[in-house]
Each structure stands twice: as C-alpha cells, then as structure tokens.
Image: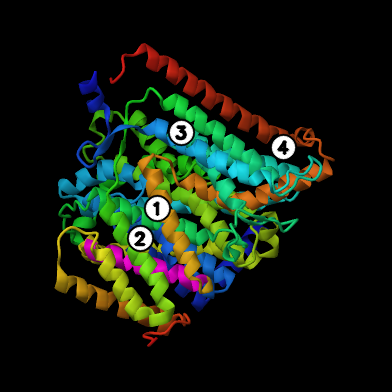
C-alpha cells in the first residue's frame, strides 16, 4: 500500500515537471481540438499527431499521446452531442440521448454532465489501474514464449470476433494484418519477405504510414465519395445554461457508477474497446431504468452511463497494454507501436525498469483529466467555431499534415506513398465492409507473435504439445478455441435460419 | 423478387450499387485471391521444420487461413443479395494525384510549392469551383505548414527550391 503511494508520488513528481505538464496540456488540448472535427475519430487524431512526438523523449511522447487520445475522446463526445456527428462508434451512443438534449435546448447541461461523468469514469479506472497493474505485471513476469504466444493468439481472436460486425471478416482482417507484419527482413534469417526488390520495405511496413492510410486518407476519400458533409446547426451554449439542476445531477450518480464498472471490465479484456463498453453500459442502463421507453428522447442517464464507461475503458485498456505488452484494440496497438519506435518494449518489466514512464503516465492521466475538466467548459465556444470550418478546406489541410507528418519520420517519400496505397486499400475495405482496426492489431503483434512461436517451438523441440503443458497457455488456448467454436456455431445457425426465412426480408 | 432485393440494400440515399456484384461474395473472392497469391509467394521463403521454423512458416500458414476464411465468407455471402457500392472516380483520382505530386515535388521544388499543388489538386475532388477560395487556402495551408514543420520542428526540407 505504502509502496503504491510512494510510486504514485514519484509519478506525480515526474508528470508535474514543467515540460511534462506542458506536453500533457498540449496533447489533451490539441487532441480535443482535432477530435471535435466530425469524421475524425480518436485513432485518426493520434495517427495525424503521432509524428510530432518523435522528437520527444519516450516518457514525454507517451504522456502527450495519451493526452491526445483522451482529449480526442472528449472532443468526439462534444461533436456528437452538439451536432449529432459522432467521430467514433463509442460516441455514437452518446449522440442517442445527447443530441435530443441539444434539441431540447439542454446542450449546456449535456456537455457539463458529460465532462463530470467522464472524469469520474476515468478516475475510477485509474484507481483500478494503480492497484491492478503491478499485480498483473508480477504474474506476467513468469511468462515465457509459450504463454506469450497463447495469450497473444487469444487477444487476436478475441479482438476480431467480439467487436461489432461480422466475426469472420474481423478474423480475416487480423490475419491480413499478421501477413502485413511479415513484410520485410525475417528477424532470425534476414530473409527478405514480400519486399519485391524494394529496399525501403526491408524494415517492414511503417506502422504510422499504414495507420494514416487506413484511417486518415481512406476516411477523406469516403467522405468525398459519399458527399456526406451534412452539417446541422449546433445549439449555442452559454456558461449559465451549463449548470444542471440538483435533480439532474443526482440522476447521473447511479448510471455513472454502473458505467464505470462496465468500462473497466470491458477495457481490461482484450479486443473490447470503448465502443463495446458504451454500448453495454447504455443497454444496461435502459434495462435498469423504470422508464426505458424514454431513452433516445434526451435522458441524462442515457449520456451518463456510456460516457463513464467510455472513459473508464479507455484508461483501463492501458492495463494489459503496458503490463503484458498486448494491446487490446487498434488505438493501444498504435501506442505500443509508438513505444517500440522509442526502443521501449511494453511488458511486465516496464513497470519496474521504466518506473518513471509507467507511474508518470498514470499520474499524467489524472492531471490530463483534471485539465480537460477545466478546459472543456470555457472552450466549448471555441469548439463550436472549429466545427464551422468547411470540410472543403479542412481535408486538404489534413492531407498536408498527413504527408509532412509521415515524411518527417525518416525523410522518406516512399512512406508517403505507402499512406496513399493504404488509403486506397482502406477505401476498398470500407466498401466491402471489412473492419480496419483488426489489421493494425495483427500488424503490431505479428513480429512478436512469430518470435514467440519460434522460440516456444525451439524449446519444445518442434512438438506443439508444449503449448498445452503450461496452465496459463492451456487456459488461453481453451478460451480462444471456445470463441472460435462459438463463431462457427453462430454462422452455421445464421445460414440455417436464413434458409427458413424468405429472401429479402 | 427483384423489387424485394432492391429494398434490402443499405444506404440507398448515399450510394450507387453495382447491379451484378454481391458484396459479401466479392469480399470472399478478394480475400481468396490475396491469400492465394501471398501463399504462393511465401512458399519459396523456406518453410523450415517444426523445431526450427523458417521465414516462410508464418506467411504460408497465415495465407492458407486467409484463403479458407475467404472461402467461408464467399460461401456465407453467396445468398446475400446486398450489392457492392460503387465508389466515385473523381475523389480517388484527385486525392491520389495530389499526394503523388507532393511526393515527386517536395524535395525538388520545396515544401511550399509541393503543398500548394497538393491543396489545389485535392480541392478538385470537392464539387463546385471556388477558384479564389482554393488559392487562398492553398497559400495559407502551405505557409502555415512550412512555418510549423520546417521552422518549428526542423524538418530538413527547403521552403522553396529552384531546380
């Protein structure tokens, strides 16, 4: 206990240093400003801003990235409440009751409640993280390659199958990501795989370039193709209109508590991101409510629960990412990628060896959340102005940021070409309704996955029975197998039920 | 039958669909092709043995799984009447051309001209012509970018270079 407190105190001393404080504030503010923009989700925001953090030292870089991430998450909620323009799936749930509140003239109250509730959810998750992460890390320290391989396999399968949408397609995209991860020189033999004689591919595909293509450029193309720049006039918000009545405030307490718990549980599990957390929290709240029929008409409960869950899961997702080195979703995959670019491999030893980074990051979460709480309210007027920038000016500016951002990583025009290629691939994928997030997870974990597989098989002298001999590995494989069996069962029963029903209904 | 199929397609207001292409089936086919091609290429990498897996082991295994998943999706989607949406040529062409131009000119002519061209070409993807607004935006974005990245972050590029 005192251990945790002294670690935390150390963390605050790291995160409150002027430079770190500045990076945290800058990250949260910029993240929020970009996250507010319609159609730009947290992942796109991070990928656009990622190159800026390369010049920083690792702790500063990750603190700033984390700030960008939760800033963007907040920003997305603002856009969905005021304009019904959710940037991400998780804030789409907030729009369900948030936008009706705006139409009723209660935008101010909705924003205020969102801010407070997000802070509460985030804080709860940080508390859980402080106590759980070191414990989890101490278990993970016993992991060998066998355990890592099986747990990664479980994470990959869970991420692709539990996310909303077709499980088969999710699985196919994780596999596609693994395939992309093998591009470049093989780590043990140095054999060039899928490089097609191109020396720039020897180091593998640049993760940032792939992210920017799949999430930045493809998004721009999709918006231009569908011509969906439908902007509604947002409500105006005065500071006075933001203060909720005591009754409204007390109505948020229960949903916030339930939402936070849902968020933390979902956030820790691999593969379940904030969107699942907010959906579950919303559904749960609707079940718990005495007036479920009024959800969707502007219920305070309908924004409190998903927002608390959303932010709790965002923070909780860092727990497996930092202690096991196994990211649960695409955003965490980018975080891991960013850490690896700085030469830090997230994993159980990070908690001890990079104590500055680990505890500094935790402390900065809290500081960043407080800053957002303070900033969010007076800046709402500014966000409304940002939302008025026409898309026809916005997207060329985003393209400029993308090009120079990727170029500056290693002064390579080739990487910018990779962005374009994956922008087109991503557009094709969205036409085929193939999810892009699992690709990133496969791409980031691919090389580690292969290394652990190779090492485990060397230890087992080529006998795969080794994966069944450790209890952790066996457990992970059993869960993974039952997930696969469940998908198989579900898709077969889908086919059968479709045959019974007449087509086209 | 045909009329009822029409009603099942998604986003009827925002997109045009192919008449012939069933989306889920096409999706499966695409994955089969990717899996097959990468698997064939990976065969020459060297499979190794189970005790010492070679560079081709994971790519081959993964390609086979991708092909099988493609088959499952194509099979599953064979009866699904949802049509593949058509994309539009202009946005794809304008965005591609703008980025290719930027890549080819940024080192030779400098950041400002390259970005100016990027903005002008990319703007052509947007319906309607606003010449003055586009030119002003192009100047503003390229100058702001130059100040931020070259002056601020020290990216080694020229502002304007004469070839």
Quarter occupied by the N terminus of chain B: top left
Viewer-nearest residue: A203 or A449: A203
Label 4 SS: helix
Residues indicated by labels 4 and 1 sit on the same polypeptide chain: yes
Residue A503, image x and y in percent? 31, 18
Q: Quadrant of residue A234?
A: bottom left
The residue wearing badge 1 is A424
Q: Is residue A285 above or below residue A145?
A: above
Q: CA distance from mark 2 to mark 4?
A: 46 Å
Residues indicated by labels 2 and 4 sit on the same polypeptide chain: no
Question: Neighbour class for label 2 at 10 Å: few (<14), some, many (≥20)?
Answer: many
The kind of secondary structure the magenta stretch mainly shows is helix
Q: CA distance from mark 4 to mark 3?
A: 32 Å
Q: Which of the two discs, 3 and 2, labels the residue nearer the N terminus?
A: 3
* Residue drawn at x 59%, y 35% as measured from the top left: B65
**Range of the magenta residues?**
A392-409
The residue wearing badge 3 is B28
Query: CB of mark 4 within 8 Å of CB of mark 1?
Result: no
Q: Is residue A397 magenta?
A: yes
Residues indicated by labels 1 and 2 sit on the same polypeptide chain: no
The residue wearing badge 2 is B96
Colour logic: rainbow
Q: CA distance from mark 1 to mark 3?
A: 18 Å
Residue A352, image x and y in percent? 70, 61
Q: Nearer the viewer, mark 4 or mark 3?
A: 3
Q: Is residue A135 above or below residue A478?
A: below
The residue wearing badge 4 is A473
Residue A453, image x and y in percent? 72, 44
Query: CB of mark 1 within 8 Å of CB of mark 2?
Result: yes
């Amino acid at each position: 206990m005192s251990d945790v407190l002294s670690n935390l105190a150390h963390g605050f001393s790291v995160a409150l240093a002027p430079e770190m404080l500045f990076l945290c504030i800058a990250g949260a503010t910029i993240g929020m400003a970009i996250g507010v923009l319609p159609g730009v989700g947290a992942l796109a925001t991070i990928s656009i801003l990622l190159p800026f953090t390369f010049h920083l030292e690792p702790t500063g870089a990750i603190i700033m990235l984390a700030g960008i991430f939760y800033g963007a998450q907040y920003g997305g909620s603002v856009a969905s409440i005021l304009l019904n323009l959710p940037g991400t799936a998780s804030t789409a749930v907030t729009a369900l009751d948030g936008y009706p509140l705006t139409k009723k003239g209660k935008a101010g109250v909705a924003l205020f409640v969102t801010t407070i509730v997000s802070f509460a959810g985030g804080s709860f998750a940080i508390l859980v993280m402080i106590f759980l992460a070191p414990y989890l890390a101490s278990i993970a320290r016993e992991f060998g390659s066998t355990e890592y391989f099986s747990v990664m396999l479980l994470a990959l399968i869970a991420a692709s199958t539990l996310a909303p949408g077709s499980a088969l397609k999710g699985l196919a995209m994780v596999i596609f990501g693994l395939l992309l991860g093998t591009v470049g020189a093989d780590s043990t033999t140095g054999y060039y795989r899928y490089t097609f004689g191109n020396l720039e591919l020897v180091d593998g595909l640049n993760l940032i370039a792939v992210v920017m293509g799949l999430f930045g450029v493809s998004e721009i193309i999709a918006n231009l193709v569908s011509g969906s720049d439908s902007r509604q006039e947002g409500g105006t918000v005065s500071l006075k209109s933001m203060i909720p009545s005591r009754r409204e405030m007390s109505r948020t307490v229960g949903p916030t508590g339930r939402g936070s718990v849902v968020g933390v549980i979902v956030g820790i599990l691999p593969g379940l991101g904030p969107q699942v957390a907010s959906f579950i929290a919303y559904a749960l709240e609707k079940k718990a409510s005495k007036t479920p029929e009024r959800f969707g008409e502007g219920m305070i409960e309908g924004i409190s629960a998903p927002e608390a869950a959303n932010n709790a899961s965002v923070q909780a997702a860092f727990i497996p990412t930092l202690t096991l080195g196994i990211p649960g979703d695409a955003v965490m995959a980018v975080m891991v990628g960013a850490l690896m670019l700085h030469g830090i491999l997230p994993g159980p030893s990070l908690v001890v060896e990079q104590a500055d980074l680990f505890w500094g990051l935790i402390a900065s979460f809290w500081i960043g959340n407080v800053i957002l709480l303070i900033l969010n309210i007076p800046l709402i007027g500014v966000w409304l102005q940002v939302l008025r920038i026409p898309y026809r000016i916005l997207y060329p500016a985003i393209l400029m940021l993308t090009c120079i951002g990727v170029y500056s990583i290693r002064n390579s025009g080739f990487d910018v070409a990779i962005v374009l290629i994956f922008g087109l691939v991503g557009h094709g994928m969205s036409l085929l309704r193939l999810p892009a997030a699992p690709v990133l997870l496969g791409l980031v974990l691919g090389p580690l996955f292969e290394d652990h597989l190779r090492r485990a098989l060397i230890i087992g002298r080529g006998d795969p029975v080794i994966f069944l001999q450790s209890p952790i590995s066996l457990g992970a494989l059993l869960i993974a197998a039952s997930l696969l069996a469940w998908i198989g069962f579900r898709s077969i029963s889908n086919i059968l039920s479709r045959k019974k029903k007449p087509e086209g209904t | 039958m045909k009329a009822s199929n029409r009603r099942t397609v998604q986003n009827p207001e925002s997109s045009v669909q192919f008449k012939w292409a069933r989306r889920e089936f096409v999706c499966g086919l695409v994955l089969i092709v990717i899996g097959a091609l990468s698997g064939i290429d990976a065969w020459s990498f060297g499979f190794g043995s189970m005790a010492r897996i070679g560079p081709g082991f994971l790519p081959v295994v993964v390609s086979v799984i991708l092909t099988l998943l493609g088959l499952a999706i194509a099979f599953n989607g064979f009866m699904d009447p949802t049509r593949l949406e058509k994309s539009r040529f202009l946005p794809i062409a304008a965005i591609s051309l703008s980025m290719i131009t930027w890549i080819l000119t940024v080192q030779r002519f400098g950041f400002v001209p390259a970005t100016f061209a990027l903005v002008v070409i990319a703007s052509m993807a947007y319906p309607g012509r606003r010449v003055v607004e586009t030119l002003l935006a192009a100047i503003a974005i390229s100058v702001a970018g130059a100040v931020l990245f070259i002056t601020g972050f020290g990216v080694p590029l020229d502002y304007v270079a004469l070839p």
